Image (cartoon, rainbow, N blue to C red):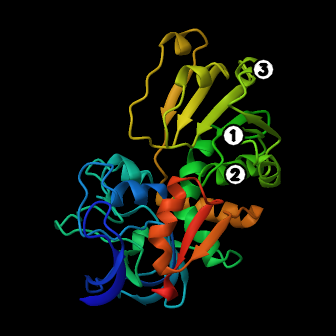
Amino acid sequence: MCKTHVLSVSAAKAPFEKTTIERRQLRQDDVSIDIKFSGICHSDIHSAHGDWAGGIFPMVPGHEIAGIVKAVGEKVTKFAVGDRVGVGCYVDSCGECEYCLRGEEQHCSKGFVATYNSLDYDGNPTYGGYGQNIVVTERFVVHIPDRMELDVASPLLCAGITTYSPLKRWKAGPGKKVAVLGMGGLGHVAIQFAHAMGAEVSVLSRAKDKVNEALSFGADHYFSTIDTETFTMLAGRFDLILNTVSAPIDVDGYLSLLRVDGTLINVGAPAEPSQYNVFSLIMSRRSISGSLVGGLLETQEMLDFAAEHGIKPQIEVIHADQVDEAYERILRSDVRYRFVIDISTL
């Protein structure tokens, strides 16, 4: 076993403290990673605050992990000591079901093992990236392209694949009108991906002070959703709306902005259930869908695509002793647009 320093919370909404945990001994197919940067995702806050049932405490959040390979097991073939690598939202799956076999480990029939706040298949709790080291099965590690900085790469391991995967699946590209609802940690990355894919990109946001930033990320249009005329003006306009906000929305109102056969895709995860009128779907054959990150092959594809097109999350790098403050700032929308922890400060 290998002891490593981490940031953990002892109970829901408890402050972070520096503690020590043990990582497992290196197995034949394992990769040991010295973590350099760990992004803060809104789901970290939901988990650490106990917003979602089933929290496992003490908890070490973090599933946007970027670092350097420290050691590899004797059967590892894809990685070597010194490689720049990343780990995302999950660290194991059965590898045998139809979904794993087609590269969609996030839908594993047995249930994937999340990077933190989960139990592995031996019944041991998993601990995430707010720490100095992590040991992960080779299959769940990805290469970070040389042209991409490690701190910038970190949020792409969740925010990047969460937005890239549905845009690709619903064929955002030339001739498609895509709206990104919300321009926060997910939304500002989604704009960049949709633009790079060739779609006409609009931003729908309550804020009125982000227009210039939206355009700099590649948006073609920006509309404020607090203006009542916006919904009348944009009725029936979009092929896709990617909803990135983690708060309740007027589902019927946004469905009205879709063309015939348009789709509202949810990647934000509010705690409250949504409601809608079924006629909002029936009258124009519209759909409501959702998307959960992506498989490992697609995650690697996303990183390579981002590097090729210069897609970069806008980040604020913080020290380890600033995580509690960062959580508070996220909850009051005081970040543009992702916090990343410099693990060297732990």
Looking at the image, is mark 1 or mark 2 earlier in the sequence? 1
Q: Is residue 310 visible?
A: yes
The residue labelled by disc 3 is: 233
Q: CA distance from mark 3 to mark 2?
A: 25 Å
Q: Nearer the viewer, mark 3 or mark 1?
A: 3
Q: Nearer the viewer, residue 13 or 242?
A: 13
The residue labelled by disc 2 is: 193
Q: Which mark is residue 67?
A: none
Q: How far from the left and from the top, in percent, is residue 42?
A: 47, 55
The residue labelled by disc 1 is: 172
Q: CA distance from mark 3 to mark 1?
A: 22 Å
Q: Is residue 40 visible?
A: no
- Report the quarter where the C terminus lies: bottom left
- 10 Å crowding of disc 1: few (<14), some (14-19), many (20+): many
Answer with the quarter of the image where residue 329 lies.
bottom right
Q: Nearer the viewer, residue 216 or 86?
A: 216
- Which amino acid type is shown beneath numbered disc 3? Met
Q: Residue at x 23, y 89 (%)?
A: 1
Q: How far from the left and from the top, in percent, is residue 184?
A: 62, 51
Q: How far from the left and from the top, in percent, is residue 159?
A: 56, 56
Helix, strand or loop status at disc 3 = helix
Q: Are marks 1 and 2 in contact (CB under 8 Å)?
A: yes
Q: Are marks 3 and 1 in contact (CB under 8 Å)?
A: no
